[in-house]
Amino acid sequence: MKPTKSRRQFLQSSGALLLGAAATSSRIHAAQSASGDKLKSAIADEDYWAMVRAQFSFSESSIPMNAANLCPAFRSVTETVDVLTADIDRDCSFNNRSKFNELLARSRRLVAAQLNVSADEVALVRNTSEANNIVNNGLQLKPGDEILLWDQNHPTNNVAWDVRAARFGLTVNKVSTPRNPASTAELLDSFTSQFNARTKVLALTYVSNLSGIKLPISELVAAAHTQGIYVHVDGAQVWGAMDLDLKSLDVDSFSASAHKWYMGPKEVGLLYIKDANIDRIWPGVIAPGWGSDVDTSLVGARKFESLGQRDDAALAALGVAAVLHDNIGAQRIEERIVQLAQRLKHGIVGLGQELVTPMSPDFSFGVCIINAADGQGGAVSNRLYTEHGIAAAATGGVRLCPTIYNTIEHIDRAVAAIEALMS
C-alpha cells in the first residue's frame, strides 16, 4: 500500500491544490503529493473523514448517496476546471494551449501508477460507455464466435454486444448468478460452466449497479485465460473506490468513469488495455492527432484518445483528483466504503427490510439496494430526497451508494429515513 499523509499534510496539500487553481494553472502542474506518515485506522478516525467531507461543496440538506451514478467532484477539481476553462477562453491560441499536452500526460501517469500499469496502456476517453464500446467494436471477431456476458452488466457492456452480434453474426450467451451466492466457487461456476470452444470474449461488470453483487474477478480471469478467452471488465463501480491492481488481476481491458467513485471531472473516462492486446483492437474514431496513415504515430493506448476536440480543463483536473486519492490512500478509501456500506445494510436489515444486495462484503461492495414492491422504488427514492434530503436512485429497488464524503451521521440519517418511508 502506498504511504498516506498525516492530517496536517493532507490539508496543506489540498489547500495548495485549491490555491493553485485559484491563482494560476501553472501551480496545478507543480502540486505534487509527497510521502507522509501513515494515518491511524480510517475506521476509528471520524475527525479525519469529517475533514474529507469538507473537501466537497454539497449542502447537508441534499446528501449525495448515489455514487453508482454520479458523485460531486472534489472542490479543488471543480476549481481547477473553472480556472483552466477561463484560461482557454482568455487565450485559445495553440501557444497557450500547448501546456495541456503535459497536463494530460501527467493525469495519465498518475492514474496508471495507481492501477500498477504502464501509462502507455491507459487511454483517457470520455466515460465508461465509450470505453466499453471501443472494446466491443474494436475486437476482431468472426461469425459464430461467442461472447459470454453477465445478465447484470451495464447496458453498454451488455446490450451493445447484442447490437454487434446482430450486425456480424456473433452469438451472445448471458449468465445468471444466484441472488444470494453461498460461495466464490458458486459464482465462478456460473460462468466457467458456460465456457466452450466458441467462447472468445467474457465481458463482465466488477460490481453490478443492478444488485450490488461483486464478482470474483481474479478467479474468473484466470479461468478464462486457461481457455484463451479475452476478458473485459467494466469497473465503473470500483475505480476510485477499490484498491485496484490491474496487473495482478490480469484483465485484458478495463473501463471506468471519473464522475463516479473517483469524484473527478465530468466526461473523462478510463480505458486500460493490456499492452499485448493493444494491436488487437481497432479504434472506432480517427481524428486529428492520429497521424497520416494506418501506422499511427500515437503510442500505445493513446490511439483510443483520438476523439477530436476535448475538454482540456477536465483532462488536466483528473490529475488533481488523482493527487487527492493518493493523499487519502486507496486501501483507506476501500476500507471506509466497506464500513459505510456494512453499517447501512445492517441498519436496513435491522428495520426488517429485505436487501437485494448480499450482506457479506465477500460478495458485495459499495452498491446497496433495498427490495421494494413493484413500482415503489421510484416513489421511495423521490421521497428520500424531497422529505429527507438523501439523494438515492430507483435501480433494482431503492439504491443507496455511500462513499468517502459521506459520514456516519449520513448513514444513520438514511436508515432513519427508510424507517419512516418503508416501515
Image (tube, grey):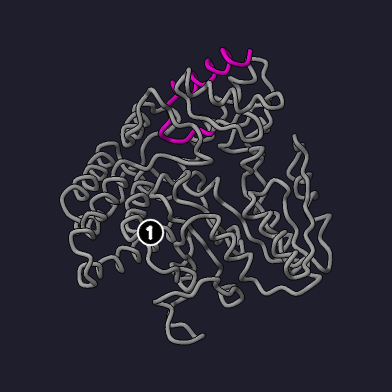
Residue 195 coordinates in the image, percent (x, y): 81, 60
Residue at (34, 36) in percent of width and height: 56
The residue lying furthest to the left in this view is 23
Q: Quadrant of the C terminus?
A: top right
Q: Verify whether residue 412 appears in magenta.
A: yes
Start and end of the magenta stretch?
Answer: 401-423
Residue 362 in view: no
Quadrant location of residue 101?
Answer: bottom left
For this view, does 110 lie left or right of residue 85?
Answer: right
| Type of amino acid at the residue the image marks with label 1 | Leu
Residue at (73, 62) in percent of width and height: 224
Residue 336 coordinates in the image, percent (x, y): 47, 34
For this view, does 345 lie left or right of residue 99?
Answer: right
Towards the viewer: 309 or 77: 309
Q: Main secondary structure of the magenta part?
A: helix
Residue 253 in view: yes
Residue at (60, 57) in percent of width and height: 249
Q: Verify whether residue 329 appears in magenta.
A: no
Quadrant location of residue 407?
Answer: top left
Tag count: 1
Residue 129 coordinates in the image, percent (x, y): 55, 55
Q: Can you say whether 321 is above or below 198 in the image?
A: above
For this view, does 91 lie left or right of residue 52?
Answer: left
Q: Can you say whether 415 is above or below 23 in the image?
A: above
> Callout 1: 10 Å neighbours few (<14), some, many (20+)?
some
Q: Which residue is mark 1?
A: 110
Residue at (58, 75) in percent of width and height: 282
Element marked by disc 1: helix
For this view, does 285 lie left or right of residue 161?
Answer: left
Residue 279 coordinates in the image, percent (x, y): 57, 78
